[in-house]
Image (spheres, grey):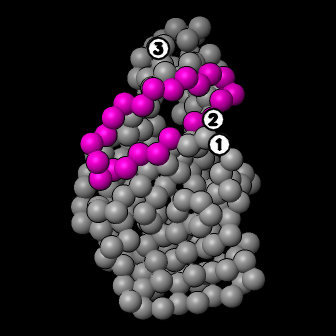
């Protein structure tokens, strides 16, 4: 399992180029890390939350089974594979809702992200960010919000056109923490502490 900020939520791949030319075909593989550095954090609004794993357990599977939404920030690592040269990155918001109410679930003490980050604030005007990434390079895109429950996708400009990166055909999602009503934290020594606001 790959570990950057935390155990990966998913390992996804997007294959093929934007054109039919084999010489320009490229693949982008990417992992999804949630909650920023050094914590992993989610919000869950439903009742019946499944038992949390140990600190070093499989939080990725737990988050999926609990229907958890990444809280405040989501880091997406995109590694270029093939003949593509990525020239620009844009984050496109596809839906905005009020922040989710519910309980925060936080795992502290994860592995640090070592890649250089591009930081995008969904609460501000979104811009096209110029980059240059070729075969083997990794782009770390950290998307954050303090105001919304947002769905978004990432657009990459490369020599073959524009590629949209999403979560297996669905948008990525991140929610602000402003409407949460409690927090449960799991520490590296496996101590768990919960509180209500």
Whether residue 142 sits left or right of residue 77 in the image: it is left
Q: Circle 2 is placed at which residue position?
A: 138
> Looking at the picture, how far across and down is residue 159, in whole percent?
48, 13
Q: Secondary structure at mark 1?
A: loop
Q: Are marks 2 and 3 in contact (CB under 8 Å)?
A: no
The magenta region covers 118-139
Mark positioned earlier in the residue sequence (1 or 2): 1
* Label 1: how many Cα within 10 Å (few below 14, some 14–19, many 20+): few
Question: Which marked residue is nearer to the observer: mark 3 or mark 1?
Answer: 1
In the rendered view, does 153 fall on the left or right side of 107?
left
Residue tagged 1: 115
Q: Mark 1 touching mark 2, by CB under 8 A?
A: yes
Up-down relation of residue 156 to residue 165 (above or below): above
Residue 13 appearing in the image: no
- The residue lying at 63 percent from left, 81 percent from top is 186
**Residue 160, numbered circle:** 3
Q: Earlier in the sequence, mark 3 or mark 1?
A: 1
Q: Residue at x 48, y 91 (%)?
A: 195
| Left or right of 176 on screen, residue 52 | right
The residues bearing labels 1 and 2 have C-alpha atoms spaced at a distance of: 7 Å
Give the alpha-carbon distance from disc 2 to disc 3, as whole Å. Answer: 19 Å
Determine contact: label 3, label 1, CB under 8 Å: no
Q: Is residue 134 magenta?
A: yes
Q: Local crowd at mark 2 within 10 Å, few (<14), some, or many (≥20)?
A: many
Relative depth, front residue between 125 and 21 = 125
């Amino acid at each position: 399992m790959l570990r950057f900020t935390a155990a990966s939520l998913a390992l996804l791949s997007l294959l093929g180029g934007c054109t039919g030319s084999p010489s320009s075909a490229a693949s982008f593989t990417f992992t999804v890390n949630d909650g920023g550095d050094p914590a992993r954090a989610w919000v869950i609004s439903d009742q019946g939350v499944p038992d949390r794993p140990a600190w070093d357990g499989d939080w990725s599977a737990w988050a999926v089974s609990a229907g958890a939404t990444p809280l405040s920030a989501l880091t997406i690592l995109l590694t270029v594979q093939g003949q593509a040269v990525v020239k620009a990155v844009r984050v496109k918001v596809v839906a905005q809702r009020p922040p989710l109410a519910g309980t925060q679930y936080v795992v502290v003490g994860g592995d640090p992200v070592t890649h250089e980050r591009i930081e995008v604030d969904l609460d501000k005007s979104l811009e096209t960010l110029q980059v240059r990434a070729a075969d083997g390079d990794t782009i770390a895109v950290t998307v954050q919000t303090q105001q919304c429950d947002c769905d978004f996708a990432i657009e990459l400009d490369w020599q073959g056109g524009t590629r949209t990166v999403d979560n297996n055909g669905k948008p990525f999602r991140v929610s602000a923490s402003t409407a949460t009503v409690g927090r449960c934290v799991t520490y590296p020594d496996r101590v768990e502490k919960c509180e209500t606001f």
